[in-house]
Amino acid sequence: SVGGVEGLMKLLETNDDKGITEATAETRRKLYGCNSLPSAPRKSWWQLFVDSFDDATLQILIAAAIVSLGVGLYDDPATGYVEGLAILAAVLVVAVVTAFNDYEKERQFRALSAANDDVDVVVIRGGKAKQIPVADIVVGDLVAIEAGDQIPCDGVLVASDGLEVDESALTGEPLEVEKNATADPFLLSGCVASAGSARFLTIAVGKHSQWGVIKSHLEKEQEQTPLQEKLDDMAAMIGYVGMAAAAATFIAMMVIKLYVKPEYLEDISIFNYALDAFIIGVTIVVVAVPEGLPLAVTISLAFSTQKMLADQNLIRHLAACETMGNATNICSDKTGTLTENRMTVVRSVYGTISDDDTASATKVAPISGKALNIILQGIATCSTVRVITKETSPQNDDAAALQSDRPQIVGNKTEGALVLLSTSKWGNNDDFEARRSAALFGKQGGSRLFPFSSAKKSMSVLVVEKEGGSKKWMLYHKGAAETVLGRCTSYLHADGSESSLSAEKRAEYEAKIKEYASKALRCVALCHRSGIDEIADPSKITSDECSELLENNMCLDALFGIADPLRPDVIDAVATCQKAGIFVRMVTGDNIDTAKAIAKQAGILTGDGIAMLGEEFRKLTPAQLDAVLPRLQVLARSSPEDKHTLVQRLNGGLMPENEEQWLEAHPGKNYMQQRDKLLPGYREEWAKSRGGVGEVVGVTGDGTNDGPALKAADVGLSMGISGTDVAKKASDIIIMDDKFSSIVRAVLWGRSVFDNIRKFLQFQLTVNVVALTITFLSAVAGYKPPLNAVMMLWVNLIMDTMGALALGTEPPTLELLARRPYRRDASLINRPMWRNILIQAMYQLGLLIFLLQKGPSIFGCKDGSRHHFTIIFNAFVFCQVFNEFNAREIGDLFQPFRRLESSKLFMLVIIFTVIAQFVIVEYGGDFTQTSPLTWDEWRITAALGAVSVPMGYLMRKIPVKEDPKSFAGLGKSAEAGQSPIGMLGALVFPVAVAVVVYQVYYASA
């Protein structure tokens, strides 16, 4: 064939150490394509337009319009076509608007998907490690991956260390496949490296890769969010009410025609009148069915997700956007989220020498060349980190890194701090890459790397070193200081000699570790062991065997205290969360003293708070943990399994439902005897302990092993900079800048979505109640309905699409973070909203009935004439325009005109509505059955509509408060319970308005 990997590299003109040259990248891209994956073909605007007619209500309306058109042309060939054609035109407008909304929704969803796929990878070009966007990979590139990375293209292994790949994305089999250069060297795109590290030669990219071929046949559907599903149910319920109102209106109109027989109906045939009644009934259904509810959620989510992306929150699942708004707990990592993840070695210990100024750039390590060489060899080889200098960084790299002289670190930042120390004057500007190359990783007879284990809090490397003409094997080990110290029996002096580790010396080291931790420093230990080839065969030993046989009786080389300062915005962000009723917990793998020091600085650990070790946490029973949870603020030295268990206990996510699932989680245990003793418990016991409603939990994670906890959380938050591909794929939101303050912004936007939907719901239900009631009452009273089909469809357009655009895109305010989160089962419509809906509806209904009765005498027009009904129509539309300002607030706050400068879309919608209303009234003519109004009539009807605003002020003076039981989270809500006076006012006011309406209506009848 081609002669194996070496033959392939010759054919592709690349090198197993240096990779391709930068100059050939563009030529390769032209020859073999770029590494961007194909997207499924999207529906055209025309297809979406056609699909919009699948709506059953629109189909009925079209059929009725066609019948009306035929009958009208038969009765009056000159003008009989107008009503039928007008209804068809209105339906066409609704279909066009729906198609545009769907098209825009799809465009925004694809834009988010593209942002989600935009990641950086490390390649070797010209002998240097370089970080580039995944789309820039070309055939022949040498790509470096490690545990947690997704394989970005198809390739063949050049070198690997303990590489295991999860190929379930392609095969469906959840087993890790061991890969090596001899037995199974092929890597396929879309799979994930679950363990080890490797370099591979790229042989297929983009649409030619395995994942590209599969993806071209896939179309990713946008999922329904819980809020959308809840609103769909509400929309269906309102639709049923509308259908009942439509049926009642049709029956009332037919009864009047057949039995009451008023004078104004004598010239209209039964068939024509029945057709009119049917069209009005169908139009009522169109108005009543609130298509705008799901649309409002979609628009609000699309708007919010775009804005959240600018706020460094990439939404992977839309449901997370709204769920995050009502989070009651956030379990946060320490490193990189609460701290800057800008690790710097500031203190160190070598044997008997303690150096408290290690960070000095001009200082040489105060130890001999022999001791320094051992430490530098351990730093260089016992690491997978890569250093990206400014010259080799892509343009979209971390801005902070590029603005300083500090190179960018790709990989573990703790390892990066040690590597940067070794390349400074402290380490005589050591060439760590040369040491790695000399170690021959991944090659026959070369060194072996066992990556960092979160369970052991350490990592090891078996390095083959040349000494004279022979080879010798050395173990280098690095990890959490207190853990590593326990495995050491000797220590390295500054002169390079070794001494036995006495109890007194061990106590000194332990005291130093505690001292570093109390100063919020991460303490890392380096050690080594020689002669390991006499104990086991280094070329064949497994990770578990290495841990058991070799990682003991080691020589402690050095302790390093690494500073990672608290992010400057964390203290305020944590305080904001706590004020918003969110319990913030730190869950970290770090030393408990370090964790407590950082947690106190951040304001997470309070005086009565509990800080606990993972080891103690695992020993608790479910009941004991429940007793601790209200005060558990720090969990240190925790494993990913501890984090998963904590999340399960908080929200009930993935809790064992039955004996079979419990035994699967606890093999070999007795279900009946131990189910109440072992964490996380079981569903029945958990539900009973907290009334079946758990916390809404957000969890941060960056490692491969954080996947289960991210999945179990209500909202999984992965880190965009430090997170692995596995963590990102398991998460719902990617925090692009790794900052805790970005999580707070996610909460703010989530609450904004929820409140915007409530605003829209308050606005729409008001219109619904009035439109349905006035149509029904006029029909029962023997009037021709004042709002004809075209008018109703225009109102429907204002109410649905325009209202959704205006209220669904309102920007958030910081006041949203001054309240507690809502419970999972909180109602969408609260008490103040019902007050606002009912009072506004009563006012509008009273106004329309008044105009129906007194309008002719006030405005000097004929009762029931087109002019009369145009006045009613205009007043009704202006009521909606001004009530839209009222709907911007759902509580007792009355500031309808505040922040209009930041709500540009809202103002555009209002302006468009007013202009369109003017055109419809003045120029609609027979088409809309309207008559031009005088300037005075415009002023009076607009002023009557504007009364909705002072009505909004008065109704908020009725003391109706939200139910305190609808809130969850920390603290007591500022929303007190409802007073008896408030309850009485809420009942009396609508009743009083109804009495007035009754008197006006029947006194005039």
Image (tube, rainbow, N blue to C red):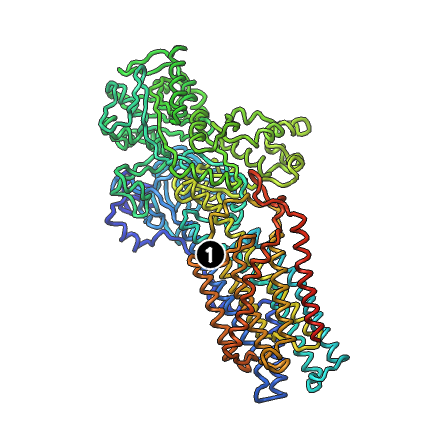
Element under disc 1: loop
Q: Quadrant of the N terminus?
A: top left
Q: Quadrant of the C terminus?
A: bottom right
Crowding around mark 1 (Cα neighbors within 10 Å: few <14, some 14 to 19, many 20+) is few
Residue located farthest toward the right when viewing the structure as drawn? 259
Q: Position of residue 805 (x, y in %)?
A: 49, 61
Give the residue number, with chain letter if any, for mark 1.
Answer: 898
The answer to which quarter of the image holds residue 838 is bottom right
Q: What's under tag 1, amino acid-wise?
A: Arg
Q: Position of residue 30 (x, y in %)?
A: 30, 55
Residue 245 position by quadrant: bottom right
Q: Is residue 904 above or below residue 337?
A: below
In front: 651, or 21?
Answer: 651
Residue 912 position within the rendered picture, expressed as x and y whole percent measured from the top left? 46, 69
- Residue 51 seen by the camera: no
Say which of 9 and 860 sits in front: 860
* Residue 138 vertical position relative to residue 271 in the rendered view, above or below: above
Instruction: Pick the residue in front: 436 or 642.
Output: 642
Residue 234 in sight here: yes
Residue at 68%, 26% in the rendered image: 673
Residue at image point 47% right, 47% down = 814
* Quarter of image, res 383: top left
Q: How many marks?
A: 1
